Amino acid sequence: MTTPTVARAAVTQTHADTEKMIYHLCWKFQRRHGGEFSEYLSIANEAFVDSYVGHDADRASFVTWLYTCVWYALLNSVQKEQNRRRTLTYDSRVTDAACERKTGFNLAAALRELSEDAATVTKLCLDTPAELVELTTCKTPGSAREVLRGYLRELGWTASRVRESFAEVRGILA
């Protein structure tokens, strides 16, 4: 046998040995987070390849390393999906009618009454630029607000202008 054939056989045998563990992890994630089992399995198999290539036998056993790599790859995929769902987009045709029907609050009319600064803050919240989304993924309470404040300060807004805009938006939503 040639060297690539031996290596391929070793990888195939290792995958076969750990396949039950990989399936179990994917099943666990599907049960806990929902989603598609086949999608989790695809992510886990990619993590298997990455962990096989990056394994250092002096630091951990392969099974431990594989379990950790697969677990975090699956967790990252779930968190990315959750973050994607949290990103709000404003569709006036759907949002206004549903909101007004349930609460009697007309969002479109309220947004028209906002000052230009408060409208800018609201637009940044509803249609967040990509560079801000990347900065607001930490789990610290209020981190999104602080990132938004910093962004507005970089645009030349004074602290009082930022504070007044937030207060106006808060007042109309309260």
Image: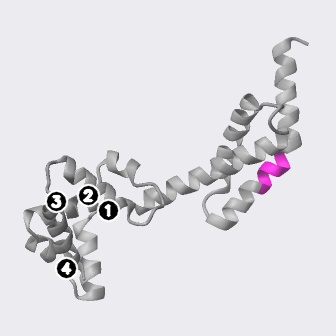
Q: Which secondary structure lies at badge 4? A: helix
Residue 68 shown left or right of residue 111 in the figure: right
Task: From the top left corner, tell me how far across and down residue 27 is, in percent.
Answer: 74, 59
Amino acid type for the residue under numbered disc 2: Arg
- Magenta stretch, main secondary structure, is helix
Label 4 or label 3, whichever lies nearer to me, is 4
Real-space Cα separation, disc 2 to disc 3, in angstroms: 12 Å
Q: From the image, tell me which residue sits under label 1.
A: 145
Quadrant of the frame with the N terminus: top right
Q: Where is residue 154 in the image (x, y as percent from the top left)?
A: 21, 47
Residue under pointer 4: 171
Q: Which of marks 4 and 2 is nearer the N terminus?
A: 2
Q: Pointer 3: residues within 10 angstroms few (<14), some, or many (20+)?
A: some
Q: Are marks 1 and 2 in contact (CB under 8 Å)?
A: yes
- Place of residue 31 in the rendered image (x, y in percent of width and height, measured from the top left): 69, 66
Marks 1 and 4, how far apart at CA? 16 Å
Residue range (magenta): 19-24
Q: Which of marks 4 and 3 is nearer the N terminus?
A: 3
Secondary structure beneath label 3: helix
What residue is disc 3 on? Answer: 120
Residue hosting label 2: 149
In the displayed structure, 150 sits above or below 173; it is above
Q: Pointer 4: residues within 10 angstroms few (<14), some, or many (20+)?
A: few
Label 2 residue SS: helix
* Quadrant assignment, res 43: top right
The amino acid at mark 1 is Arg
Q: Residue furthest right?
A: 1
Please report the residue visible at 70 percent of the width from the left and 51 percent of the height from the top.
71
N-terminal-most mark, 2 or 3? 3
